[in-house]
Each structure stands twice: as structure tokens, then as C-alpha cells.
Amino acid sequence: MRIIPAIDVLDGKCVRLTKGDYSTKVIYNENPLETAKQFEAAGIEYLHLYDLDGSKAKQIVNYKILEQIASKTSLKIDFGGGLRADEDLHIAFNSGAKQIIGGSIAVKSSKTFSGWIEKYGGTKIMLGADCKNEKVKISGWQEESAIDVISFIKGYQKKSIKYVVCKDVFRKGTLEGPSIELYQKIIDSCSNSESQTIKLIASGGVSCIEDINALEDIGCEAVIIGKALYEGKINLRDLETHI
């Protein structure tokens, strides 16, 4: 299973939020590039870079940080946050993103997002399915919709989406363990579809190696880890057998 450390950027700094609440911001590094280099030095190959400023502004903001990390490390970066227009997408790819994540745009403008999938393919375009109580959350987790997350994923599965990043916002930054039951439910539901099987990337609540093993056991393709790394609950050396 792929291990993907997370860097969330707010005001140009590496931060973490609890349950998606911006008022809970904790700054871990003034320079996200330094954090990215530490991950690379530990043998990490992938990085989840999320533009919190972009989510609030509803357009890409921290593309210079993306550009810095992409040009000064060999990390394969998936990038999300504020991608609402074709121009945002062009900027993200031109700045070095290997994959982009569309969440709010997939809810608010299905036509635009579906067009991205058709143009770039279901591998480079990833679906962001952030949720709380199995209902999709959007706009940097500030807005809640009435959309069922499994129905949401299955709808785009039929449009050839391959990678789905599912973040249980209620667990984000809590270190209380991932939503195993939710992810199992998603995998089971989407495996029964006539469309291609999705690659589910779990995010939120991971606190220890046992959590990672449990996600691997149910069939998650990858896991995004944030606070557990920053708080020292999981040491990068502990991940060597998974890298």
C-alpha cells in the first residue's frame, strides 16, 4: 500500500487542522519545502499537497509552493484545494502536480469536472470525496451537502474515475483512528459496480502503524498521513516496510 504524507498549506505555512476547523490551526513548519525534503530523505515517494488558502478563495493560491516542492524534490505530488476552473488546472499541472484532486468542483459543476476526466483521464484527475456522517463536504469543509458519499463516488466511477481520496472530516486531525467501516462500505459498494474498480485512498484519523495495516487489509490502495507524523505518533522509520 502506498504511503502518502500530507502537507496542508495555509498562509504559506505547513499546518494541520482538527476536524477541518480553520480556527484549530497548528503551524508545524514555516517552510513547507523543508517538510517535503524531510519526507523525501526518509525514502517517501509521494506527497499530498492541499491548498487551504485556495479552498477558501475558490481558486488556486499556493501554486508557487507546489512549484518549489516539485522542482526541488523528486516527490510525486497530488494537489488539491481551490481547483474550480480550467485555468486552475493548467496552473497546477504546469507547476508540477502529477495528479489533481477535484472535490467541490465535482459537486458544483459536474460538467466541468467530467470534462477534465475526459481530457486528462481518470488517473491524472482524482475525485475528492470528503465527507462527514457520509454526506459530502465542500469548500474547504465549510459547506455540507445532502449528497451521499457512496452515490457520489459511484456516479463518477461510471465516468471512468480511477482514484478516490476519501477524507472523513470528523476524524481529520483527531488521531482517533480511521473510518474503517466507511472505507469497507465504499470498497464493497464500488466493487459490485459494472465500472472499473476504484483505487481508494483513505485519509483522516490515522494514528499508528496498526491503523495503516487495517486499511491495507480491507483493500485501500493508499493512505494519507498527516498529524500522526507531525506529532511523532508515527516515525518515518516505522514506515520503511510499507514504502
Image: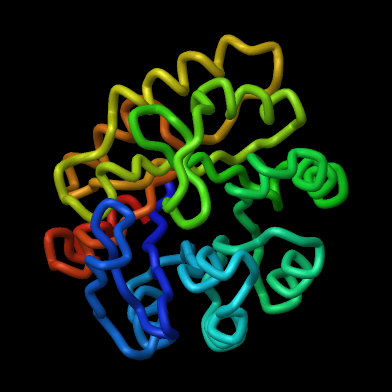
Residue 195: give x, y in percent of width and height. 70, 19
Residue at 81%, 51% in the rendered image: 120
Where 10 falls versus 223 (above or below)?
Answer: below
Q: Is residue 48 left or right of residue 108?
A: left
Q: Is residue 113 left or right of residue 98?
A: right
The residue nearer to you, when weighing 96 against 108, is 108
In this rendering, position of residue 171 left or right of residue 189: left
Q: Nearer the viewer, residue 193 or 84?
A: 84
211 w.r.t. 85: above or below: above
Q: Locate residue 145, reporting x and y percent.
A: 50, 35
Would you identify the image quadrant in which residue 27 lies?
A: bottom left
Residue at 47% across, 62% down:
48
Residue found 63% across the figure and 47% down from its top:
126
Up-down relation of residue 36 to residue 237 (above or below): below
Quarter of the image for residue 109 reads top right
> Quick one: quadrant of the N terminus?
top left
Where is the C terminus found, in terms of image quarters? bottom left
